[in-house]
Image (cartoon, rainbow, N blue to C red):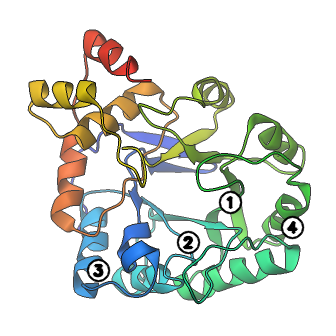
Amino acid sequence: MTQTTTLPGGTYRLGDFAVTRFGYGAMQLAGPHVFGPPADRPGAVEVLRTAVELGINHIDTSDYYGPFVTNEIIRDALHPYPRDLHLVTKVGARRDERGAWPVARSPEELRRQVHDNLGRLGLDALDVVNLRMGGLQDPEPGSIAEPFGALAELREQGLIRHLGLSTVNAEQIAEAQSIAPVVCVQNFYNLANRGDDRLIDDLAAQGIAYVPYFPLGGFSPLQSGTLTAVAQRLGATPMAVALAWLLQRSPNILLIPGTSKAAHLRANVAGASLVLDEATVKQLDSIA
């Protein structure tokens, strides 16, 4: 049963449905380096069910997490899905036998990935599909018309409800919008990496969600004396402060912090409820 506790940040309109601004990113449910099965599959099931119990209705995933592992765990843990639960997946890459992430963006590959996500999640249509472009953290210039057009065709067929983009620049977003509506953009952004500040504000004005990944720095964790000092003063963790700052940064920001532990998920939700005063926000802004 879903708890009645209000999640930090409230909700945001994503296309034709409302999602909790505090969501859950399922990437860490797979094994080490997002490859293979988890060491604790019952724990992975528990964290997903805890997310739903807490009222989170926005889960971010992909069939290439594992590969396939994360989506299979989501289906085992939550299917049949609650009516208000929305699964957001991404396409544009695959995993090879060594665990690398080769690009897979041809129309044929994208169609296969969409059908694979549908099958493993047990869905007739995907709520949101993000087209993953760019490198690990930064956009790469170039047209995205062909791959985005392929996804737009699947949207017209009813297999996808809404489309989003990941690791893209403003020009690529505009190009995509000339083909089909875009409801969200998922890019690398956090306290120390503020290159998308203007983009976030532009998207907010258009009613488009911005979903930052790596809220605490990514594979090289953000090491900041300022962040540590603020967290200690507030009696909170650096992650709690980083998440709270993101929620206050702009009303169109949606969070998808990941964890493989239910207790850690509860701590993230509680921590993001921090209210940062103007002086604290100014101090944190100096990190960039």
User: In this rendering, would 235 be left or right of 24?
Assistant: left
Q: In terms of image quadrants, where is residue 242?
A: top left
Which disc number belongs to residue 45?
Answer: 3
Observer-nearest residue: 175 or 121? Answer: 175
User: In this rendering, would 216 be left or right of 232?
Assistant: right
Give the labeled residue for mark 2. Answer: 62
Observer-nearest residue: 216 or 125? Answer: 216
Q: How far apart are marks 1 and 2 (CA)?
A: 10 Å
Give the labeled residue for mark 1. Answer: 132
Find residue 48 and report its horizontal and vertical position in percent.
Answer: 31, 71
Find residue 2 and report its horizontal and vertical position in percent.
Answer: 25, 62
Callout 1 touching callout 2 (CB < 8 Å): yes
Q: How far apart are marks 4 and 3 (CA)?
A: 33 Å
- First in residue order: circle 3 vs circle 2: 3
- First in residue order: circle 1 vs circle 3: 3
Q: Is residue 240 above or below residue 286?
A: below
Q: Which residue is drawn at 60% across and 56% down?
A: 136
Q: Residue at x 76, y 74 (%)?
A: 104
Q: Which mark's residue is nearer the viewer, 4 or 1?
A: 1
Amino acid marked by disc 3: Val
Give the labeled residue for mark 4. Answer: 150
Q: Distance between the residues labelled 3 and 2?
A: 16 Å
